[in-house]
Structures are given as C-alpha cells and as structure tokens.
Image: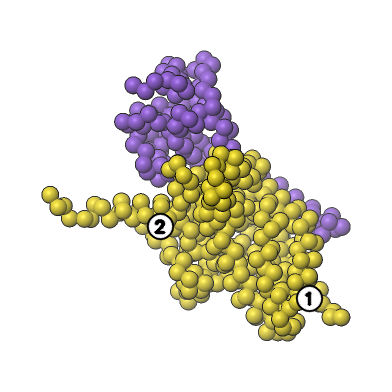
Chain colours: A yellow, B purple
Amino acid sequence: MTLEPRLADPVQLAIPAFILLVLLEIAVARARRRPAYELRDTAASLAMGLGNLAVGLVAGAGVYVALNFVHQFRLVDIGYRWWSFALILFAEDLTYYGFHRLSHRSRFWWAAHVNHHSSQHYNLSTALRQTWTGGLFDWVLWLPLALVGFPPALIVFEKGVSLVYQFWIHTEAIGRLPRWFEAVMNTPSHHRVHHATNPRYLDRNYAGIFILWDRLFGSFVEEEPGDPCRYGIVHNLGSFNPLRIAFHEWVAIARDLAAARSWRERLVFLLAPPGRCFDGSRRTTDEIRAQWLNAAIAPARPSTG
Amino acid sequence: MDPKNPVTLLIPLVGIALILAAVWLTGGARRARLDRALVLRRLAEDLPDFAAGEMVIDADGAGALIAEAGGTAHAVAFAAGDKVVVRRLERRDLRRVALAGDRLTIDTGDFTHGRVVLALPGEGARWAARLAPGERAP
C-alpha cells in the first residue's frame, strides 16, 4: 500500500486572491477610465464559476475513481519525488494543450468550452466563466497521465495549479511582459489573442502555462497592436442567463442532429469543427480566415485589365 | 470547495457580493446605445458578407433593423449590456413578428437570445411588413 501525501487544492487556496485581484482590476480600470466590467456580464461570469465549483464537487469523486482505476495499470511508478512535480508540470500542460485544441476544433468538445469564450469582455471575471458540462467528461484526456504512472492526486493537484496560473492572464490591465517571459510562458498578451474573434486570431494560442506548445505545434500568433482584439465568439450571445450560456451549443447540436438527413451529417454536426454545416449558413474558423485572407490580398493584386 | 466547511462556501459568496457591488459603484450598470456608425462597424466585423441597406434605429438606441442592399435578408442589432450583438435574419429564421403600437417584437427561436423588441415610432408597421413571413419579395 502506498501512502499518498495530502496535497492542497490550489484553486480553493487561490479563491481569496481571485476576489482581491478582481477588485484591484476594477479599481485600475476605473483609474484609467477604461471600463472593463459590465454588471450583468460579470454576474453571469461569477454564476458560471460558482456552477463549475458545484459540478466539480459532484464529478470530482468519479474522476478520482477513474484515475485510480487506470493507475493500477501504470507503466512505471513515478510516485512523489521532487522531479515528479517538475515532470507533471510539463506533462499536464501538454495534456491541457491537447484538450484545449480539441475543445476548439471539435464541436462536441466546443459545446462544453464555448461558455468560457462567450463574454465580449476580457477581464479577470472572464477567467471564472467556466464550463458546467465539461467536467463530466473532459477528464478522460488526463487518464493517460495516470496510466504512465503519475499519482492521481498529483494529476488533480497540477490541474489546479494550471487553472490558478491561467487566472491572471485574463486581463487587459497588463500589456507586454519581458521578451524572455513572453517567449516561454503564456501571458495576458498571448491569451488575449486566444479570446479574440478577429480572423487573424481565431483558434490560436491554446496554451495553459507554457506558450512553448503553440510555438512547437504551429498554433502561435502574436498580438498585433494594429489589430486590437475583439472578444467573444463568432455568434455572440445576446443573453446573460447562465442556462443559455452553459447549454446554448448543446441545444444547437441537438437541433442540428434532429434535422440531419444522414448518419454522416450527424457525425459532422457532432464532431467536426464548430461552424461546419451543409447549407452555407455558418462558417468554420478555417473558412473565416480564408475569406479574410482573400479580402486582404485582393486589393493588393495588380489589375489584369 | 469543502462542502463540510461552510467558510469555503461563504468566501466565494461574499466575494461575489463585493465584486458586483464594486462593478455597480464604478458605473458598470450601463447599456450600449446604438447609432448608425456603431451598427455598421459591428456588421462589418460580425457579418462581413452582409451589405447594409436601409436601417432603422430603435427610439431608445437599444436595437436596430437593417435591410440587405440588393437582397431579401435583414439583420438585427441589439444591445447586450454595453456590447452589441448582430444576427442575420432570413425569412426562414423568423418564428414570429408582432407589432403592438410602435413596438415591434421579433422572435427567431434562437436559444442564444430572447425576443428582440424594438421601439420604432412611425416605422414599425413598414418594417413589420418587410419582415413578416410570407411577404413577397419586391
């Protein structure tokens, strides 16, 4: 029998800091006369955060059971050593990158993740606008870490560390950080790009803690001062109702599945990139970017007349 | 969050109250006021294929209806807090268009927003007729 050390829950420890930093950001925005917060938008984000905590309470036990079950078949026994904490930092962050990229590129996963992007504001309260449905299934992507040999409690601890790290990057109050930091770490600038709907920025910068993964896998885009970020989603929500925020894409999927004419269409509606359709009424990120690029290139083409 | 420890529940709840009070006290309870320039900018950003034609702005600046130039589609823009949301409206999207006095109600059945109600003094009937399902295209 292995005795596991009792690891703290980083998110629970960080909640007072979250609150203080949001209050500080409100004060800074006020001082700079750049309104960053809107009342109903903030209330909706906070309600989503509270709901996410509640879902986490219910789903958490099941996640532990699943991680422990898989851990029985571990390839190596990594245990709790000083280097385990260093290794899990990178391994979990790479897992997060994969999860996050999938969450933008497959509609089933997007349906759970979209609510995090549904605010047209970008501030620290946006970080708290978390999913109500993703916690029910997204943990399957972390099971390989348990299979490799990371202790389940360490995996859960590191997921918390990642969430806490990603809180402070949801702000416009911080511009660019020193070059070495921007090169390695995910920063407010990099994550503003991720939340933007400008065609240049759509579905880029999936990183959690280290921006290295985006640089490595070709999904990195720099924030351009000449193209200020417009936040939100391609079809912005006209509601602050948490139920609409949490479930709107699931409702859209259900409607599409009901109207689908074949199993191929059903699969596409469920798993293909968001925006994929058969009647031209919606566009995927790739289509939006291609159209934008064509429009940008067209005026520069020499006349053939 | 530890369900057995009420303090862990109390801290987020007190924090939420403090944050909302701070947002309200710093003027956060504001709403976008639409004008022609703002609507055109948002159309260009969100619906780049939509060629804006005739436009009518709600009397309170809370919304706008826009006809497509050279087409039969419309677009609706409305305030969502201090931001703006736009939607393209094809005839098939319209579940119900109703006029009560000067107030035009548009129901699309879109789960991402409720019904859009526009105050259009002197203009409501004309725009209701343009939008109404079954109307023949000119």
* Element assignment for label 2: loop
B26 relative to A225 in the view: left or right? right
Amino acid carrying label 2: it is: Arg
Amino acid carrying label 1: it is: Gln
Identify the residue shown where x is 48% and y is 39%: B84
Q: CA distance from mark 1 to mark 2?
A: 45 Å
Residue named by callout 1: A72
Q: Chain of mark 2?
A: A
Identify the residue shown where x is 31% and y is 53%: A294
Q: Chain of mark 1?
A: A
Q: Confirm whether residue A239 shows in the render.
A: no
Measured as percent of width and height from the top left, residue A230 is found at: 46, 51
Q: Which numbered marker is on residue A200? A: 2
Q: Is residue A170 above or below residue A118?
A: below
Q: Residue furthest left?
A: A305
A145 relative to A124 in the view: left or right? right
Measured as percent of width and height from the top left, residue B75 is found at: 43, 33
Identify the residue shown where x is 81% and y is 77%: A5
Displayed quadrant of residue A103? bottom right
Q: Confirm whether residue B114 shows in the render.
A: yes
Camera-side residue of A269 and B100: A269
Camera-side residue of A259 and B93: A259
Measured as percent of width and height from the top left, residue B78 is found at: 49, 34
* Element assignment for label 1: loop
Displayed quadrant of residue A44? top right
Q: Quadrant of the N terminus of chain A?
A: bottom right
Q: Are marks 1 and 2 on the same chain?
A: yes
For disc 2, the neighbor class at 10 Å (few under 14, some 14 to 19, many from 20) is many
A53 relative to B115 in the view: left or right? right
Camera-side residue of B122 and A159: A159
Measured as percent of width and height from the top left, residue A214 is found at: 49, 69
